[in-house]
Structure formats: structure tokens, C-alpha cells
Image (cartoon, rainbow, N blue to C red):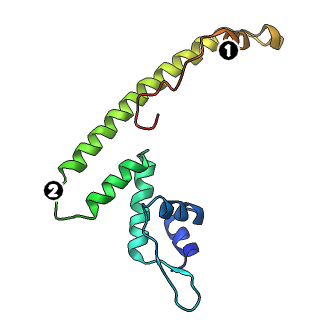
Amino acid sequence: MKIGELARAARCSTETIRFYEKAGLLPEPVRNASSNYRQYGASHLERLRFIRNCRGLDMAHDEIRALLGMVDHPDQDCGSINHLLDEHIHHVDIRLRELQDLRGQLLDLREQCQTAQAVDTCGIVQGLAHMDTASGPLRETHIG
């Protein structure tokens, strides 16, 4: 199948497919001898769906690459896959705490302006202008 057919079957864009190829997550297909078009097979579709499912679970490309490396060696045990997923769950727990902290900051900020007023006296604007600025990313997760 051509790249457009693969994209439709996997419900993604052709750019996504090319990106995953360049990232080394999806193997490059063979090219048709007469037209030089890329020819994808069922294995490409299966791998692309796997990658997209991992991305849907917010896995980083390095995590996906590691999983694919393990999938490519099906004779090994899945202990390292369990470990990878445990680590990812830990990252999600951290991100949930970070999001709860963010929500608290936003709620505090929102309380600073209960009614519509001139922008220059808006408590939210004043709060944003005077709050301490973080020195860098506050995230502790693998995607920070």
C-alpha cells in the first residue's frame, strides 16, 4: 500500500508516518522499482498502530523505542516491559500532582478578580504581573 493508504488505515497523516520513519520508530519501506513509490505492508500498519497507541498513552518516543526494541525480540521475557510501564505510571502520578498544583495556582489567581472591571485594575492581570516567575520547567516527569 502507498503512504496515503497507510495513513488512512492507521488514522493519521502522511507527515506523521514520515516523522516516525525519520525518528527510527517505523522502518522505511521498500520502493516500487517502476514508480519509486514507497510500498508499505501489513507489518508497517501493525507497528504504526502500536506506536500511535503508545502515544495515546502519552509515552515518550524513547519509551516507545525501548518497547519496540523489546517487541522485536519476542523470545525474551517481558520483565523489562513491566518495568517500563511501572516507570511510566510513576511519571503520570508526578504529572497528576503537577496538574493539581497548577489548578490550585489558577484557582487562587481566579479569586483575585470576581467581577468584570478595567483591565488595568484586574486582579488576575496584577497577580500575573507580580507573581514569582519560575526559573525553569517545574516538571519532574520524563517529558519535562
Q: Residues within 10 Å of mark 2 (few under 14, many from 20)?
A: few
Q: Secondary structure at mark 1?
A: helix
Look at 44% across and 50% down and name the residue there. 55
Asked whether the residues under the numbered discs 2 and 1 touch, taking CB atoms below 8 Å apart as contact, a structural biologist would say no
* Left or right of 121 on screen, residue 41: left
| Residue type for callout 2 | Asp
First in residue order: circle 2 vs circle 1: 2
Task: Say the numbered circle drawn on residue 16.
Answer: none
Judged left or right of residue 54, residue 121 is right
Q: Is residue 144 above or below residue 98?
A: below
The residue carrying pointer 1 sits among few (fewer than 14), some (14 to 19) or many (20 or more) residues within 10 Å by Cα, namely few
Is residue 36 shown above or below 100? below
C-alpha span from label 2 to label 1 = 52 Å
Q: Indicate the position of residue 39 as horizontal and vertical percent values.
A: 50, 80
Question: Secondary structure under badge 2?
Answer: loop
Image location of residue 66, percent across then percent down:
32, 53
Q: Residue shown at 38%/73% (left/top)?
A: 43
Residue 109's quadrant in the figure? Answer: top right
What x and y, as percent, mark residue 28? 46, 72
53, above or below 84, in the image: below
Query: Where residue 80 appears, x then y in whole percent?
Result: 21, 49
Q: Nearer the viewer, residue 105 or 128?
A: 128
Task: Please give the name of the residue rendered at 45% of the width and 38% of the height, measured from the top-left corner.
Answer: 143
Q: Identify residue type, mark 1.
A: Leu
Give the residue drawn at x 38%, y 34%: 92
Q: For residue 111, what is the image quadrant?
A: top right
For label 2, the residue is: 77
Dot 1 corresponds to which residue?
A: 128
Q: Quadrant of residue 37?
A: bottom right
* Residue 56 position (above or below residue 96): below
Residue furthest right as drawn:
118
